[in-house]
Image (cartoon, grey):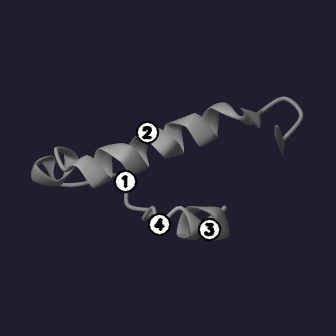
Amino acid sequence: MYRTLKKLNISRKKSICASQQEREDVKEKSYKYRKWLDLIDIDNKRIC
């Protein structure tokens, strides 16, 4: 998982400052990460 987050240039912090959340690049990375999470099949423990 660490390597995937690094490739997507996403940090592993729990949260970010409110001012950073409004930046377009942060919004885009968050969106991509959430879309990636949707691909994970929890029952079969694999990425579709």
Q: Are marks 1 and 3 in contact (CB under 8 Å)?
A: no
Tell me, for residue 2, which label it has, or none: 3
Q: CA distance from mark 2 to mark 4?
A: 13 Å
Q: Are marks 2 and 1 in contact (CB under 8 Å)?
A: no
> Which of marks 1 and 2 precedes in the sequence?
1
Q: Which residue occupies 24% across, 48% down?
A: 24
Q: Position of residue 38 (x, y in %)?
A: 64, 31
Label 2 residue SS? helix
Q: Residues within 10 Å of mark 4 (few under 14, many from 20)?
A: few
The residue to which callout 4 is attached is: 9
Q: Position of residue 48 (x, y in %)?
A: 82, 37
Tell me, for residue 31, which label it has, or none: 2
Residue type at mark 1 is Lys
Label 1 residue SS? loop
Q: Are marks 4 and 1 in contact (CB under 8 Å)?
A: no
> Which of marks 4 and 3 precedes in the sequence?
3
> Which of marks 2 and 3 precedes in the sequence?
3
Residue type at mark 2 is Tyr
Residue type at mark 3 is Tyr
Q: Residues within 10 Å of mark 3 (few under 14, many from 20)?
A: few
> Which of marks 4 and 2 precedes in the sequence?
4
The residue to which callout 1 is attached is: 14
Q: CA distance from mark 3 to mark 4?
A: 10 Å
Q: Are marks 2 and 4 in contact (CB under 8 Å)?
A: no
> Which of marks 3 and 1 precedes in the sequence?
3
Q: CA distance from mark 2 to mark 1?
A: 16 Å
Q: CA distance from mark 3 to mark 2?
A: 18 Å
Residue type at mark 4 is Asn
Q: Residues within 10 Å of mark 1 (few under 14, many from 20)?
A: few
Q: Which residue occupies 84% across, 41% down?
A: 45
**Viewer-side label of 2, 1:** 2
